[in-house]
Image (cartoon, rainbow, N blue to C red):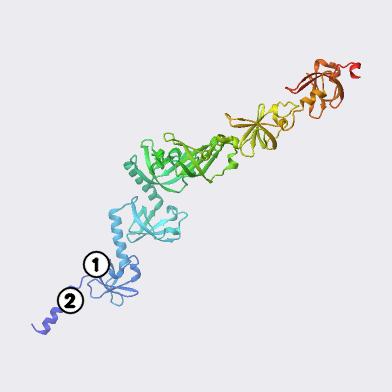
Amino acid sequence: MSVEGKSLELENAYFNSIKELKEGEIVEGRIVALTPREVIVDVGYKSEGIILREEFDDIEDLEKLEKVEVYVESVEDEEGKIVLSYKKAKEARGWEKLLKEYQEGDLVEGIVSKRVKGGYIVKVFGIDGFLPQSLSAFRGKEDGVIGEKFYFQIIKLSKSKSNLILSRKDALKVEREIARKKLWDTLKVGQIYKGKVKSITNFGAFIDLGGVDGLLHIADMSWKKISHPSEVVAVGDEIQVMVLDFDREKGKISLGLKQTMPDPWLEIEKKYPVGFIVKGKIVNIQNYGIFVELEKGIEGLVHVSEISWIKKFINLNETFAIGDVIEVKVIGVDSSNRKISLSIRQLERDPWEDIENLVTIDSQVKGRVTGFAEGCAYIELENGLEGIIYNEDLSWTRRFLKANEVLRKGHTYDFKVLGLDRSNRRVILGRKQLTPDPWPQILQRYPLGKVIEAEVVKVTNFGVFVKLEEELEGLVFSGEIDREKMNSLNPQEKLKVKVIKIDPTSAKIGLSAKVDEEESS
């Protein structure tokens, strides 16, 4: 073949290899070169196409891309070059997929690309869809959703109008319903699910399991006793809960939080045997005792009677504070009722076992009045022991119906130790015994028949009390004084009386106002 023939053959082969392109069609091209601003694509035409690099902003590693679909915008521009578009090819394919596989009302996945006036632009298969602000459900996190992927419901779909309207708000409803159905279909007792605390009440918390709410009752929140659910959870917390029971027809689910953790009370007797000494933190203080947390979920009670061997009247709130770490002794374990009895006093020896070394009979001591009862008063001695003083031991010469007539609560006085009440663990005290018994001298000073002038103290229905001397009174019986005269008497008036009865045992002196002239003289 001649040179001219061979050249003609190559020329014909070249033109036969050139594809016939039509404007508006999508063809596959090969990337042959990259510049900082452009991508050169060979589609098998007589010239290569140039596409601005910004059209490939959705491709992270453009250097590794070899082939790409492009849209033919023009076979020849003014310069005779082919005009291609990657973006339009992607949009065209996106519309094909949308129209073929989706319809209005369906859910479709998209990425929020930017915020615009009145809403957002959402990329769906390369197409710019519009998400109105009112349908976004992005309130409070508007700028934080850019670049995020969500499902949207298709509200309007029209290629001819290039119109794709989306709704995240409606998609959420559909998602919740799908999640709700899926959850009910897969729900199992004993299964552990992740949930979010939706709201808190006095009796528990409602947990969103993903479209379905379950109740976490306060009794199933913690192995330890709590007074309010807010001690364990807060609104917005994400927690792991176990399904304890459910009723699909009634739409009720019972959840447990403590059941997701080991029961700390298992084999508690082995961990805290009777006699075991341990440190714990005070978590609650009541009038009847203090609760001590030994570990998470395990609390014991130190009853007020187990605080001290010697102090019975203890203000626990003054002695202890929540958060204090104290040492206690285990004195009882009841695993079935989840109770542990603790003691502070049993960490030390009972002082009553050796009381003689603490208290000596006939010794003088100081004590503070802590309370009153019928016929007596309770005293706290300086060494912490409890004492008791009976009304008859308050005074040699006066009788008191109530001890608070002479003693004041909270005040400190001197006392004499009279004896020990071991059965009630009390020291028996006296006040009058601090001074000698005056009655032998009184009997000498006031013999029967003696007439004296006394000062009226008080007039009663049964007689008149008169003052004979300091701390010594007598009673003029109502039958031993003229009634009219008795009713006319006033305190501090003088009255002549005669001693007619005297009883040192009861500290009483009986008097008569019926005194004749001879006796008074």
Residue closer to the observer: 279 or 239 = 279
Above or below: residue 441 compared with residue 181: above
Horizontal and vertical percent position of residue 453: 87, 23
Q: Is residue 473 visible?
A: no
Q: Is residue 122 left or right of residue 25?
A: right
Residue closer to the observer: 327 or 347 = 347
State the image quarter where residue 434 is shown. top right
State the image quarter where residue 127 is shown. bottom left
Horizontal and vertical percent position of residue 132: 42, 55
The residue under label 2 is which amino acid type? Tyr
Q: CA distance from mark 2 to mark 1?
A: 19 Å
Residue closer to the observer: 5 or 326 = 326
Q: How many discs appear?
A: 2
Horizontal and vertical percent position of residue 212: 39, 43
Secondary structure category for the residue under label 1? strand
Circle nearer the viewer, 2 or 1: 1
Task: Identify the residue under disc 2.
Answer: 14
Secondary structure category for the residue under label 2? helix
Q: Do labels 2 and 1 touch, CB within 8 Å?
A: no
- For this orientation, the residue located farthest to the left is 1
Task: Identify the residue under disc 1.
Answer: 28
Q: Callout 1: few (<14), some (14-19), or many (20+) C-alpha neighbours within 10 Å?
A: some
